[in-house]
Image (cartoon, rainbow, N blue to C red):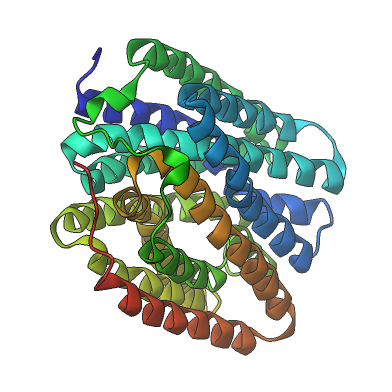
Amino acid sequence: MGLSPWGFVVTFGVVSLLMDVVYEGARSITGPFLGSLGASAALVGAVTAAGEATALALRLVSGPAADRTHRYWAWTIAGYLLTAAAVPALALPLGVAGASALILLERVGKAVRSPAKDTLISHAGSETGRGKAFAIHEALDQTGAFAGPLLVAAVLAATGGYSTGFAILAIPGAIAMVILFWLARKVPEPARYEATVEETEGDAVALSPDFWRYAVFVALTMAGYATFGLIGYHLSERGIAPVASIPVIYAIAMGVDAIAALITGKYYDQIGIKVLVSLPILAGLGTVLSFSGGFWTAIAGVLIWGAAMGVQESTLRAGVADLVPKQRRATAYGLFAAFYGAAWFVGGTLLGYLYEKSTAGLVAVCLAMQVAALVMLLLTRQRGSATSDR
């Protein structure tokens, strides 16, 4: 191999770092940006939730296609190209409909690349420990998620407009693509990192009941987990925080995300999916506090929200890799993401609606979902011991 497993993980993490500067920089102002174009809270909630659902549900197609074609690099590169093009295009004067379409297109890029990308990382993780591999990748990823909003905040403070903030994000996107093409040439077959190869044909291997219980657990958690678009809208519309400070708040949350990923990734390799008890607790508490009280309560909520995002974006993916056979991994990532993506769309839209009607109703729904998620995890964890092939 052209790189060690850790070299592969870290280099891929640098690509994700740069691309997170792009799309997390944009996402940090999505809510206020749509609001400036005349969008209502319900529309902001629907668009941002639909974006997340799109990024997840379309993996039903991209995951099995990646496994079928074995062209994991092609799917990864195509997805990143869509994101690198869609985000700077938000600088164009397209109105609410056009901006919403580009936000969704950026998320389509996420859907195209993610199952293949996660499969590539999971191969290297068989040597390093999957919890650690996904945690390091997420930590680098979230370094970009920290820097991107700060870059956008600086541009907003300097220019007072959104267009320049979106346009400048073309630069890190271009650099990321150069590194990604180099990495694909350097390590054309990351599957060789895995010493053990399962012989059973991929389509003949069924996904286990543990995998489906795991998917239900995550779906319930995400149904009660607000998007930052809605949180940012709340902070802006209620006058809790100045618009220019919202990307900074988001950046700090992404820093917490990276720390949470490293901690839970480490403990995942030691105790398995039991560490995921933390997810519904963090998701519920973070969402509730973000919409309760004044500035400092909301800030505490956003930081806890960020910790939940760190668990979601790293340790959950390690769990999928250890619950399914190697040859069905991209398919499983696609199914898993689509399953909870649909739940996030329904939940995000519902939370946006409840926000306009009753904050107490929003809190009640959120807490009910997290309690149900905990119950499902308790049913899963005893039988969900990793079937890792590392």
Q: Look at the image and tell me in which quarter the N terminus lies.
A: top left
Q: Position of residue 229 (x, y in %)?
A: 62, 58
Q: Look at the image and tell me in which quarter the C terminus lies.
A: top left
Give the side of residue 10 with respect to residue 366, left or right: left
Q: Position of residue 160 (x, y in %)?
A: 68, 41
Q: Nearer the viewer, residue 273 or 238?
A: 273
Residue at 46%, 63% in the rendered image: 215
Residue at 54%, 74% in the rendered image: 224
Give the side of residue 88 with respect to residue 177, left or right: right
| The quarter of the displayed image where residue 152 is located | top right
Q: Position of residue 362 (x, y in %)?
A: 61, 82
Q: Nearer the viewer, residue 26 or 340?
A: 340
Task: Say if 81 sits above or below 266 in the image.
Answer: above
Q: Nearer the viewer, residue 30 or 314?
A: 314
Give the side of residue 366 with respect to residue 273, left or right: right
| The quarter of the displayed image where residue 61 is located | top right
Residue at 42%, 69% in the rendered image: 213
Task: Say if 345 sits above or below 325 in the image.
Answer: below
Task: Say if 206 sits above or below 293 in the image.
Answer: above
Residue at 37%, 52% in the rendered image: 320
Q: Nearer the viewer, residue 357 or 76?
A: 76
Q: Position of residue 100 (x, y in %)?
A: 77, 47
Give the side of residue 340 with respect to residue 127, left or right: right
